Image (cartoon, rainbow, N blue to C red):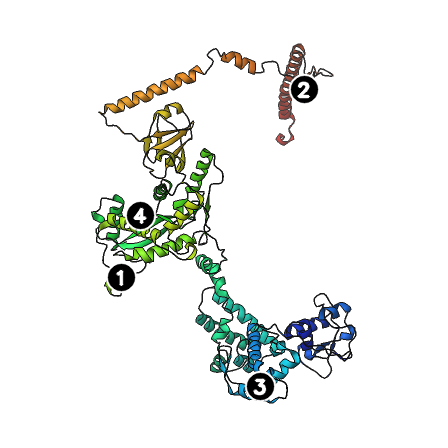
Amino acid sequence: MMYLRQDAPISAVEFAVLAGITRRAASKAFLSASQGKPWRGHPLPVAALPGQRGGAGGVVWGLALDKASPELRALLKVPETLSSTPVERRLKGRPDDRHIAGAVDKQRIIAPIVAHPKGSRERAAAFAEAARQQHMVGPGWSRFSERTLRDWVQTAEQGGPVALMPAGCRSDKGTFRVRITRRWQDGCGLPEVVQDAIAANLEGIARGLIMKGNSFRQTRKLAGNELQRLSAEAGVTLPKAGLAALCKLTGAWVSRYREMKAARDYTSDHKRYSDQHEARVNRTLTAVPMEVLMGDVHRVDMTIPDAIATGDPRLVMGAKIAQAAGRKTIRLAIIAWMDGSSHYLWATPVILGPGQGITQQDVARSLYEVITCPWGGIPREIMIDNGGEFAALADAVARFCAMAGIMGLGVVKSAPYSPEGKGRLEGAFGILEKRHVSALPGYIAGDRMNSPTKSKGKPVDPYPHGPDQLLADILEAVRQFNGTPQDGQLGGLSPKAMLEEKIAATGWKAQGMPDEATFDLVFSKEVRRDVRKGSITINNRAYSGPVLAELIGEKQVPFLVPLRDPEGPIICFRNNVIHQLHAETFALNDRDGAKHKAKMVRLQKAEMKRRIALADPTVNVQQLLTASADMGPVACNPPDVWTFGSIDKAGVIGAPMTEEAAAEAEEARNREFYKEYLASRRGGERGASGGNRNSPSCAT
């Protein structure tokens, strides 16, 4: 019980109990209140507790409840009038399952005792009997003294079964009472404020080290070195060996920050984070077959020594590259499609050499097998990943929906490194590989970094039957998978049995395509080319066909390259008709070439005649040009006339003058010029003779 007095401030511990917070949080709240800061929007009337020293500035603060506001009293559940009425102490922390289980065990142990009246011989005998026996408490067996049993009985009879739980749990449950290590905390001699600062700094360092991929051992070592430096800078004066021993960190301290491993995965390994930490949702099987078709590619390695002897150019090239590189393995890829209602699997194995990968052509051929299958057909939705081999499917499905007038069909792409969208298919790959493919000779799993060994020091026996039989064996393994009962959502049924059950329950029928040409039309890649001389060029190959005669001179015409066979006929879809263009090459003396040219020229002439017939031959171009041109005078404002106030006949001011006036002015200027010239001549002659007679410098 806790008694609250009207005339005495309550301590931080008592405030923490009332507020349901930690002692440290209460002390910080009191310190902030002494600086005028509110706590949860309420002012705390704090006062220094007399006779106590400690904390910041050596002052210990307490809360004066008699000066607290009614709102703060209500928040702390303190009555308006404080008297000697005891207020029941609240639990310091929330009891967990361990505490509840302990109370239940105690109640079970004392049940035979409390069944007898108080003070009776029967109860005394029950106490003695219970003390002699061992009782199951928690994970083990224990024996309790009679005194302990009597305390339990007294507690239960006074407070009920709830009183058997601990009087209170730690108020700071979930926090660490030791900052770093007890040895460092007790031996460093630093103030608590400095210790808190060093602990916070070291925590950030440890979290950063773990997030950047360091192991717990490496983190403990590096953080310990940093703790030595921080302690020395804070004023710890110990020899180097003593400081190292004082700052040695424990594994328990590093384990506090194990949560940073998930942050490490989030920042540096998205796939690992997605596989182990990202939230998932549980999904059930679809009710109708082919509502969802999931596609993915899985790869395993198998040894094939006679790959070069096969007639497959792709395999021969890959095998030669592998042989030149000193390798003895060929990769095997499985393109798989899974029905979302039954986990039924369609698979297409493809043998790859070094540097080879799954192409869109491989995916289209594999999907063709599903769509043409009587229990497959066109799915409502295709779920794939973001791999380049599936890049063209989205456009293909959109084209199919537009042509067929079907709404709702689509392609869903899983996020990178996210297994949720295709987790079922990856699980099926695991079952297929472990139970069926692994039974084939030469299997070395999908770890291409490991050497092909059946056991350590013993090489794997090569696959003895060649690549053709290998592909057949892979398909046989897929059939085994579809026919084998499985647990989980299949409930003991095989994928084949579940598919048959869904077909029978819903009456579903596969929606297929009429022929290969329709499939190639849908699952193809669009390219645009200019039609020149009756042909187009794609991948350095010339394609021609009668439909190109109708496209003479057209530019950027759309054509479709089938994904299933990119080197086969090209499709021109025009006026709802599928036209196939073939890559035809003729020899110099091949008459079929001349026939083909004559046919194309004839079709082109017919197209020209059709286009000419659509034109109006009576069109007068000059008349239309004249009619469309604005040939009238230019619309403008009346011009201003330039007039002169006087005429400068002498040509002095440069004003305009008549021809007669200009001639007279010119004649007057000439006369004036001659007068001045003659005058200068006469004056020069007189000056020269007079000078000779009267010059004083020449007198003697």
Pointer 1 residue: 453
Q: Residue at x 32, y 33 (%)?
A: 541
Mark 1 or mark 3: which is in front?
Answer: 3
Upstream in sequence: badge 2 or badge 3: 3
Proximity of marks 4 and 3: CB atoms separated by less than 8 Å: no
Would you call the spot at circle 2 few (<14 residues within 10 Å), some (14-19), or many (20 or more)? Answer: few
Disc 4, disc 1: CB below 8 Å?
A: no
Label 1 neighbourhood size at 10 Å, few (<14), some (14-19), many (20+)?
some
Above or below, comparing residue 150 to residue 43 in the picture: below
Q: Which residue is mark 3?
A: 148
Quote the CA–CA distance across marks 2 and 3: 138 Å
State whether residue 527 appears in this view. Answer: yes
Query: Horizontal and vertical percent for residue 247?
Result: 50, 78
- Position of the C terminus, as image quadrant, is top right
In the displayed structure image, the side of residue 464 where residue 626 appears, left or right: right
Query: Which badge, 4 or 3, is on the more N-terminal residue?
Result: 3
- The amino acid at mark 4 is Val
Q: Which residue is mark 2?
A: 654
Q: What residue sits right under mark 4 in the picture?
A: 350
